[in-house]
Image (cartoon, rainbow, N blue to C red):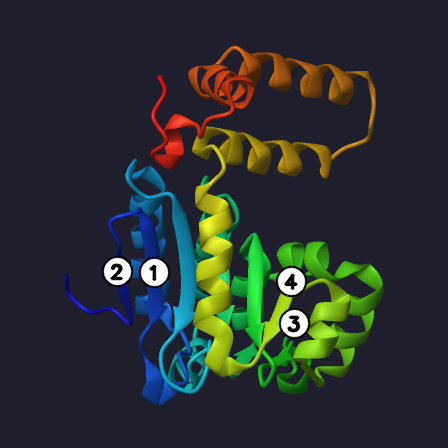
Amino acid sequence: MEHHGFITQIDPRGVAHVWLDRAELHNAFDDTLIRFLTVELDRLAREKAVRVLVLGGRGKSFSAGADLNWMKRMAGYSEAENRKDADALAGLMRVLDRFPKPTLARVHGAAYGGGVGLVACCDIAIVSRAAAFCLSEARLGLIPAVISPYVVAAIGERAARRYFLTAEVFDAEEAFRLGLAHEIHDEAALDVAVEAMVHRLLAAGPHAQAECKSLIARVTRGPVDDAMVADTAARIARVRVSAEGQEGIAAFLAKRKPAWTGGGGA
């Protein structure tokens, strides 16, 4: 596959590791990386063999956000051209946020600007104790606009009011306290921690996981009204009678592992 700033590796279990691979630029992204990474994530989302996505960065950083050369080009763009450019980045964030399989961010070094957006779009974030985070846009006279729905969902409005406005750097402990990070580990132990989480994810039903992600998106975007209550009831009824739901219940009752773990069964 032609190199467009990232590398994809898929292991026999269906774990897809996507590595941002512009180490010399701290994995900053530009329009080319955004375009091709969006296409790649869309491909992996449709690939039945893929069970889990792990997103990481090569070199010293996870992602430093926008590439400076790209920012220089954008500064000369018209408002319409800037809108098209922003739409492309928004599209990348949406594809990652709506990815139908579990997504895991492996974060070391710097995660700045759009890099924080990528972390927030993943279901689970496992970070190095030495990781550093920054929503740096306001220092440049800009705003973290297209990443804001995902970052605010991760850290809450109150924290966003501080970190969007100050553009200050915060550490892994603060990322954990805010809910952006789920686990903190020494960098040497990061891959072991990621693998442990992947192992847990592979033990659950893949269709159930997709349904869980859809469910979370639904219940966090509206009031708990009659329509919401009816929708949640309809969802579990549909899943209970699905092939995977039936297999999961049968395996539990028979005290065996379900088929999707390689444990036999229907």
- Lower position in the chain sequence, tag 1 or tag 2: 2
Report the disc number at residue 9. Answer: 2
Compared with residue 176, is residue 214 higher up or lower down, i.e. above or below? above
- Lower position in the chain sequence, tag 2 or tag 4: 2
Compared with residue 100, is residue 247 higher up or lower down, i.e. above or below? above
Q: Is residue 242 left or right of residue 138?
A: left
Residue type, label 2: Gln
- Lower position in the chain sequence, tag 3 or tag 4: 3
Q: CA distance from mark 3 to mark 1?
A: 30 Å
Circle 4 residue = 182
Q: CA distance from mark 2 to mark 4?
A: 24 Å
- Lower position in the chain sequence, tag 2 or tag 3: 2
Circle 3 residue = 143
Taking depth in this image into account, of 74 and 151 the one nearest to the observer is 151
Dividing the picture into quarters, in which one does residue 181 lie? bottom right
Circle 1 residue = 17
Q: Is residue 93 left or right of residue 146?
A: left
Would you say the residues marked 1 and 2 are in contact, meaning their CB atoms lie under 8 Å apart?
yes
Q: Quadrant of the N terminus?
A: bottom left
Q: CA distance from mark 1 to mark 2?
A: 5 Å
Q: CA distance from mark 2 to mark 3?
A: 34 Å
10 Å neighbourhood of mark 1: few (<14), some, or many (≥20)? some
Q: Is residue 41 left or right of residue 238?
A: left
